[in-house]
Image (cartoon, rainbow, N blue to C red):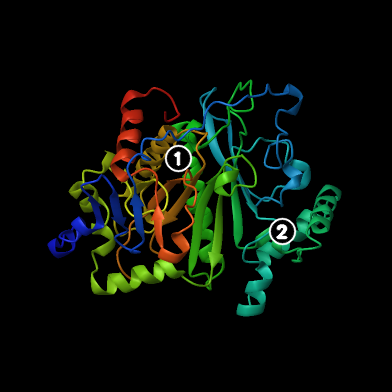
Amino acid sequence: MRLRWGFVSEFAAVLERLPDGTVKQRHPISGTQVWTVPGRGNRPLVPPPVAHHRLDPAADGKHCAFCHLRYLETTPEKARLVRLEGTPPGAREWRTLTGLTAEQLTDTIAEFRLVPNLFEIVSLDYWRANHGYTVPSELAARRAAYVGTLGGLSHVERLMAIKADSGGSVDSLFGGFHDVVIARRHFVEDALCDDELAGAGTLTLEEHRHYLAFTVAAMRAMYVTNPRVRNVAVFQNWLRPAGASFDHLHKQLVGLDTLGTSREREERLLAENPDAIVNSGRPLALAHDLLIAENEHAFAFAGVGHRFPSVEVWSKDADALPWELSRAALDGWSDLLHACHRATGVHVPTNEEWHYRPPLSPGTAPLRAVLKWRVNTSAGFEGGTEIYLNTIDPWAVRDRVADRLSSDAGPALP
């Protein structure tokens, strides 16, 4: 990894603690200004305990539209990842299934499902009208086969009735560019109460690795299917305060015909300094003692200059696109991200944002995830000043996560 000391010399201006204890941050890429004022950084992340309710066993598998006994409430699957009996007996083999009919959906239980979003941010009609996109013959054949059964036709008719007010074509139910990756569990195995949610940190290491690999494959497919896609945004909203429609683990992928402001800013910066993004990771973390953990393929550190307390998890491979990473490298990145989710716990609303270099973009930018804890409330003066209050400074974030990782005392932060 190359290191430009001129860039490192600017680290002092990125993060500083004033004599009164106020911490001022400036994001090294975006320039976002964030303050943490004394006395607020020690507040607990998890709210005081609230009454919880026992689960109704009759509702198992039916708690929300993403649960496995309500498959027909989502759009027809693009793919599902299942675990089947393998060889030798008792072994579990992971397998991707595609082309299932409505009648076949309950033949297996999907560990993860890839489905088009019923209410797209960027619709299929957008791509048709603005870019002349035409549905591939494979997708047209898939649609015809699916509605060719009574169950499939009924499923599609019900969904189109739901979409009547928002518009959109039948084709969008099969092959748009806003997808959702849905995990199987709503609650952890053998849960008794409704506060025992199944989040990213409650997956096993193996499950989380497949969750991420399945998502990366879906991301790549968007670029291959539609050459007009310049950028695929990947994110995970956990819990309703973080923007989730359901408290059920899922990621979203949205294909865009523009890079977006943040990536455009990165490209301008990289034109001036090819090492700018790489140096804003590990060198910055080491300069301010923010490193939390690392393995052979990835490292995690407390982020600087975010509006919310944040943990960043970076791949050590600075040049590879996400789907170009070796399986070992992607697994190593997954394991650290999983550990940070586990340390955060399922009761903290979070956003997980993926950042990487889109295929046609120049420069060096590794795959990295920013895990943001949505625990701040706007103070009211941000709009006029563009200075944001972050209640927990990066060193406190580092200590909280590192302590949980080292103590292995359970999934929730104190």
Quadrant for residue 396, please give it. Answer: top left
* Residue 316 shows in this picture: no
Q: Residues within 10 Å of mark 1 (few under 14, many from 20)?
A: many
Placement of 382 over or under 214, stated as above or below: below
Q: Nearer the viewer, residue 384 or 204?
A: 384
Total labels: the figure holds 2
Residue at the left extreme, as displayed: 5
Which residue is identified by label 1? 209
Amino acid carrying label 2: it is Leu
The answer to whether 316 appears left or right of 336 in the picture is left
* Residue 272 shows in this picture: yes
The answer to whether 127 appears left or right of 256 in the picture is right
Amino acid carrying label 1: it is Arg
| Residue at x 20% of width, y 52% of height | 283
Which residue is identified by label 2? 173
Q: Secondary structure at mark 1?
A: helix
Q: Secondary structure at mark 2?
A: helix
Q: Position of residue 88 (x, y in %)?
A: 51, 25
